[in-house]
Amino acid sequence: MIDPTARIHASADLADDVDIGSGTTVGPRTSIGRGTRIGRDGDIGGDVFIDDGVVVGDRVRIQHGAILYRGVTVADGVYIGAAAILTNDRRPRALDAAGGLAGADDFPVAPIHVASGATIGAGAIVVAGSDVGASAMVGAGAVVTRAVPGHAIVAGSPAARIGWACTCGERLLDSTGHPAPAERERYAIDQELVCPACDRRYAYVRDEQTLRELDRPVVSGGALA
């Protein structure tokens, strides 16, 4: 069902059973496949391709020319940049085992989950099966080949962690006021990471290689000790 307050461009191509929430905008020449669900207050740009069965949360922005293939799930508040591609097959072939042209049911889908508040930069490629954690930031043009932890900043091909991002998107600093390095071992004397824009503070969670937000500074013997 398409909510009556959703704004769908006349040139968009939507399957009959698509669900689109209230206040969401769909741009020109965008194609949305069967069984896809898109939440409320989103902004789907022009020339976007969203495959069958994709799930998109609330307040998601998908920029011009992005492609989301079957098996992709996007949580609330995610940003997907122009021409980004989220794939679903790690070993693609044109032909099936009998030598005929392979169809959608001839390969196992390796799903991708993009967690809340994450950013996928323009032109980035997320390879099938590579989840992106909450508030993570994938740099423009990056090629993601493995899971990205929450709050991690990754860049390059293959994408590697280069630092840490706040929920607000600013790069986090260490206790010396410099951008916090990617690896915990390089700043072992530091007790917390700090956002210079909004003053949020975080501690590194060693086992999960991610961050957790703090409600007070970490003291000696705390989470990072």
Image: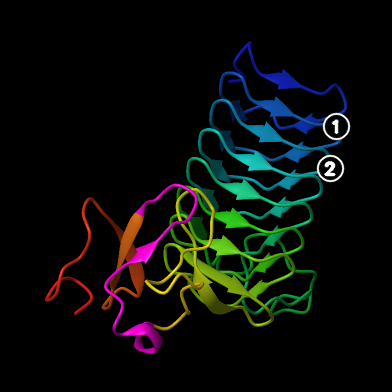
Q: Residue at x 61, y 31 (%)?
A: 42
Pinpoint residue 123: horizontal percent, then vertical percent.
77, 62
Q: Nearer the viewer, residue 33 or 80?
A: 80
| Quadrant the N terminus occupies | top right
Q: Residue at x 37, y 66 (%)?
A: 193
Q: Any mark on residue 167, and which? A: none
- Residue lying at the far left in this picture: please name it: 221
Q: Which residue is mark 1?
A: 28
The colour style of the image is rainbow
Pinpoint residue 112: horizontal percent, then vertical percent.
52, 61
Q: Which residue is mark 2?
A: 47
- Residue lying at the far top in this picture: please name it: 4
Q: Secondary structure at mark 1?
A: loop
Give the class, few, some or many, for how many residues have Cα within 10 Å of label 2's Cα (few <14, many ≥20): many
**What kind of residue is marked 1?**
Pro
Q: Residue at x 61, y 69 (%)?
A: 107
Magenta part of the chain? 184-200
Is there a contact, CB below 8 Å, between mark 1 and mark 2? Answer: yes
Q: Secondary structure at mark 2?
A: loop
Between marks 1 and 2, how big is the CA–CA gap? 6 Å
Check the image and report above or below for 194 versus 82.
below
| Quadrant the C terminus occupies | bottom left
Q: Earlier in the sequence, mark 1 or mark 2?
A: 1
Q: Residue at x 55, y 46 (%)?
A: 78
Pinpoint residue 97: horizontal percent, then vertical percent.
68, 80
**Prevalent SS, magenta region:** loop
